[in-house]
Image: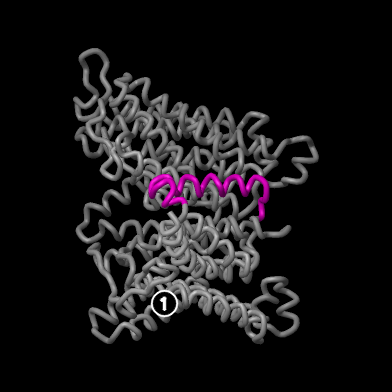
Amino acid sequence: MIETLLAALVSGLVLGSLYALMASGLSVVWTTLGVFNFAHGALMMVGAFVAWTVSEAAGLGLLTGIAAGTLVAALLGVLIERLLVRPFYGHRSMLLITVMTTLAAMIILEKGAQIIWGARLKQLPRLIDGEVSILGATISAHEAVLVGLAPLILFAIWRFTLKTRTGRSLRAVGQNQNSAALIGIDVPVAFAIAFGLSAALAGLTGALLGSIRFITPVMGAEPLVKAMIVVIFGGLGSLGATAGAAYLIGLIEALLIVWLGLYWTPFVLFLMMIIVLVFRPNGIFGGKE
Amino acid sequence: MSTRARDILVPLACLAVLALVPLVATESYTRHLFIIAFIYGIIASNWNLSLGHCGVFNFGHLTFFGVGVYTAAIAAKTFGINPWIAIWLGGVTAAFAAFLIATPVARLKGIYVVLVTFAFSQLAMQLVLSQSQITGGAEGMVRIPFMRIGDYSFVRDYKLGYYYVGLGLLVLSTLFLLAVINSPFGKSLKAVRDAEDYAESRGISVSTQRILVLVLSAVFTGVAGGFYAIYLRVASPEVFGFGTLALALSMVLIGGTGTTYGPIAAALALTFATESLAGIRGLEEARFIIVAVAMILVLRLAPGGLLGLLNRLKI
């Protein structure tokens, strides 16, 4: 019994790390631009495919592949911001329009990937072979790297937005664009940085996930839906709340899988989300908007 | 021609043309495309009721369609209910599903409406996939009973019967939408969309209107889903996917949000356009990319949709 529980906790930690990386990227874009990027999962998928092409097809090594996947996703993110988000800035129903344009971007990326890479399943090798035992539960060393890396990355983003000049300019733009522009912050550049950073996070997550799951054109859809549940729980407003909610959801999901099985878990998660929303429309950790 | 006469005569003329199409389009493939276009026309124009007329950011509209598809499929195949009744049951369950999701959604604002309705559609798909002994899981359900009157099977005569059932449902759905939009209730929806605070101060309950509009928009969407299942004799979880969602959304956008006939016209145009693209080798997947690009271009260049653009130019 205890062993099953510990195993669930550890697998919850792996899921939580994945969701934290996904959801923090969504949160960075949301707090800076007020845009919810539906293409976030597709950017993750592109990161995985590019990492596979560079590392396996071209044979340049896994680390080069991961770096390339991250970089290509970041560039695509900047491109999406420039072409699909910026033209609608200041529009009355900008929120709705950017949901639709990023949804269109998602379709383009998914179908594009299917045409370029085909539907055959692909997988990346692992960063480190072997297994690691945590609290008596065994996970692959690669998953352990993911678990260890996620808090480091989250900490780095948090320090970046708090302490660096660029990071603070992102927050300033998020709070009040006009005032930010008045004190000499280049608002369009801040938007591009936020989108690029978020997309880079997605690409990196995808490249790391490509060793654990199969790489397919639709691999980003499920993590995106989970990241949505996370941001509904945590609210989109702050990075800390989003990360906290990500680990919480990961743990709850792992426990539910043990308790109810794989099929009923999404259903219960969704019900919990509805209940949270009815009582706390801005999320468990979210304040007033 | 006065505007009023134009609003009545032009649609009637279009209907007359559509009623005569089977005389010209005698083979079953062209008729099939028209039937699919009628179904998409119902989906898009009813989605427009909540999205365009009331400003509810509902991204789970295809869930109502999927609920209709599976209701009719299960009713007709598993329980042996007459397909003519089964398609209307699709409307009933879809309206009920809409009520379930509308109750929490009515209290939410902005992006959270998008997220919850979207997550709802994903959940419905999960449910269909997991209950495979009822729904057939990922393979879906096949060989669903077809429509017949007495001994006459609707599959015969190159789908002539199905063509007129599809057209009839589209007409019914459109009359229903017109009645809703032109009623005082319809005007209160516009008030909720354009001036929420003012509407509330005049005694309109914003959350009640949102619940009602979602339920009303689900009725014919569910019926269309039921008809889809009976006509194609297949129910597959694909109806909940991103592809169908994007196609229907592009019809609403290209046709013009807030117009009545725009999404129907766009549904006809886009069904034929995407189907003919699918016939070109190598474009089977790329056609979705083309639709997505068209959606972006319309948002960028003609936010009122193509029909809105024509109206503004006074053509």
Q: Give the letter of the chain under mark 1.
A: A
Which residue is more in the foreground, A243 or A1?
A1
Q: Is residue B311 above or below residue B216?
A: below
Residue tagged 1: A145
For the point 47% across and 34% down, the residue is B10
The spot of residue B128 in percent (x, y) is 37, 41
Q: Is B23 situated left or right of B240 in this image?
A: left
Q: Is residue B122 above or below residue A49?
A: above
Q: Residue A86 in magenta? A: no
Kindly report the secondary structure that dominates the magenta region of the rendered protein. helix
For the point 64% across and 77% down, the residue is A170
- Figure quadrant of residue A141: bottom left
Q: Is B146 situated left or right of A174 in this image?
A: left
- Figure quadrant of residue A288: bottom right
Residue that lies at the very extreme toward the front in this rendered image: A2
The spot of residue B80 in percent (x, y) is 29, 20
